[in-house]
Amino acid sequence: MSKHTNLNKLSAAGVLISLGIIYGDIGTSPLYVFKAIIGDRIISKELILGGLSCVFWTLTLQTTIKYVLITLKADNKGEGGIFSLFSLVKRRAKWLVVPAIIGGCALLADGIITPPITISAAIEGLEIFYPDLQTIPIVLAIITLLFIIQQFGSSLVGKAFGPIMFVWFTMMGVLGIVYIVQFPMILKALNPYYAVDLLINNPGALAILGAVFLCTTGAEALYSDLGHCGRKNIRISWIYVKSCLILNYLGQGVYLWNIQNELLDDRNPFFRMMPDWFLIFGISIATAAAVIASQALISGSFTLISEAVRLNLWPKVKINYPSEAKGQLYVPSMNWLLWAGCLMVVLYFRRSENMEAAYGLSITIAMLMTTILVSVYLKKKKYPNYLIALFLLVYGILESIFFAGNLAKFLHGGWFTVLIGSILFSVMWAWHSARKIKNRFVKFVEIEQYFDVIKSLSEDETVPKFASQLVYLTSANFSSEIESKIIYSILQKKPKRADVYWLVHVDVLDEPYESSYKIEHLIPGKLIRIDFKLGFRVEQKISVLFRKVVEDLVKNNEVDITSRYESLAKFNMVGDFRFVVLEKILSRSNKLSFWDKVTLDYYFILKHFSLSEEKGFGLDLSFVSLEKVPLMVSEYDNVELVRLK
């Protein structure tokens, strides 16, 4: 926790780390934003000044004010991101799970385009030297290599991210200044009048807004990486980042000013403004920045999925931890799904300008969802109602306009990210809904009424001993209750005699890194309950945690785990442990609504591809017994049966 606290301290190292981790997406946007704004339009003074004004005020209103100044306040013990935000406010209303799921899916879906568009835009700069260069194989190779190295962790490479991105932003700023000095009048583009004038008088205003929005697509990632850098470091580093971005956009504006009344064709203003002698260095640095932007996106996706798993919004999947560094995790299934998605994007769209047409639609949806959740957070923090209403009104309207602008992209490729997002949403919603349906059919009983029979069974030597220490995972939130199916498993399915019975309950908390436990001796020396309280970013290695708790109890003489077999007891041998996992299956005879049945059918299909309960909880499989129990057994009323003589 001390490391976590230090992240919020302002330091030069913290600012440098911020440059490397969180600005990849937003920092590489000059590669394609102005190219997208011009598109196939004739370059004009109104288009240049209006486009620059739109970019400046979008970065100011959307990124600076909404995210850097307001949304970063909504930290969950120092952590950010849409699921961390949801954890802060979910107790305010049940429906808040909807914007959280939509936002998370939209981020994952639109993120599939980030590596292809940034890497393609960088590599296409080589066409200035080699006009006939086939860029697609190069882009595919870089993307594939990037996903292959994920399994080894990015901590070593990550140490170089900060300095490289500092060089990148400085290069952009210097290039911009060189052009601004030649034509200082371009600074008048910062006047909001030109943005308003362009949007009112240009018939293609919505399409232009869709292109302008690309300059702020990384704002959501900025919030997601709050825990890696700390609020103060992000805010200070953003001053430098925004300054360099604006300088570069203004420089591109000066370049375009010199070629008015022409079509842009395949020229990219970002590379064309570089002097010839510097071009190869500029392309190399741009490629490195594009890879860093992609790495940040991939790491962010892993974090999103791991949070979704812990919040029961995604099937349990394998999560690896390649290094001890905080936030370093690797989700194999998501890694290869993202890889396949990125390859599909490259092969389908082929050029970065085609990807621009699809980029941004989903991210506007994610930003709208964040606006809803942040407004609830502000309400929770008792901000004045008029300020919350103003926040909702301003950003609801602004992001709705951007959404309308990006909606024009639907037929030009936006459908791809919407389709991916919809598939992801169906998975999250089915997993979440199925859990609620299952909970309706879980029957709890008062555990106290079974104390005597459990104690008698434990001492009944006519019953073969099942295990010395028998452990059940329980979903009962209160120590006074237990699932009836656990009682059935112990006493009736096959009476399971044990020296000590353990009930283990895992409570996932709304904060990220809590890790504590509570002990209750329900029957002294016979029945013990452990309640683990784990943050939604804590790995649920129940075997390891359980062993640690037992060691502490033995050390404090609260429990005796010595084997009761005479031959082993005289040598003080530790008794055996066995976990019993009850796997719920859907019985054939049940009364469910059509929608509930479809949801559960989908859930069990997903469950087939997910980790089993025992693997999901990190249990040692050599000590696990699996019992299948029906989710529900519904009795049909009015069954008439005649006995024949």
Image (cartoon, grey):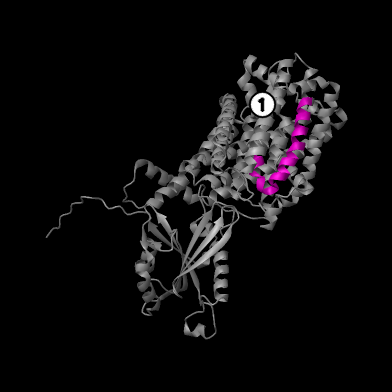
Please check the rendered image and state whether residue 589 is part of the magenta-colored stretch, yes or no.
no
Q: Residue 124 at x, y = what percent?
A: 74, 30
| Whether residue 467 is situated above or below residue 434 in the rendered picture | below
The picture quadrant where one finds residue 286 is top right
342 left or right of 263 in image: left
Give the quadrant of the C terminus. Answer: bottom left
Vertical placement of 642 versus 259: above or below? Answer: below
Magenta region's main secondary structure? helix
| Amino acid type indicated by mark 1 | Val
> What residue is pinned by disc 1?
212
Give 622 or 57, whichever is nearer the viewer.
Answer: 57
Few, some or many C-alpha atoms within 10 Å of disc 1 (few <14, some 14-19, many ≥20)? many
Residue 273, image x and y in percent?
81, 26
Q: Nearer the viewer, residue 556 or 464?
A: 556
Residue ranking furthest to the right: 277
**Local SS, label 1:** helix
Q: Residue at x 65, y 32 (%)?
A: 62
Q: Residue at x 58, y 34 (%)?
A: 387
Q: Quadrant of residue 497?
A: bottom left
| Number of marks in picture | 1
Residue 137 visible in the shown view? no
Q: Which residue is drawn at 54% across and 44% down?
A: 86
Which residue occupies the foreground of this view, 262 or 223?
Answer: 223
**Chain part drawn in magenta:** 221-250
- Residue 102 coordinates in the image, percent (x, y): 53, 38
Whole-percent x and y of residue 257?
78, 18
- Residue 103 visible to an observer of this rendering: yes
> Taking 496 as reference, is 335 left or right?
right
Q: Which residue lies furthest to the left in this view?
A: 645
Residue at 52%, 52% (x, y): give it.
316
Residue in front for this viewpoint, 77 or 48: 77
Residue 222, magenta (yes or no):
yes
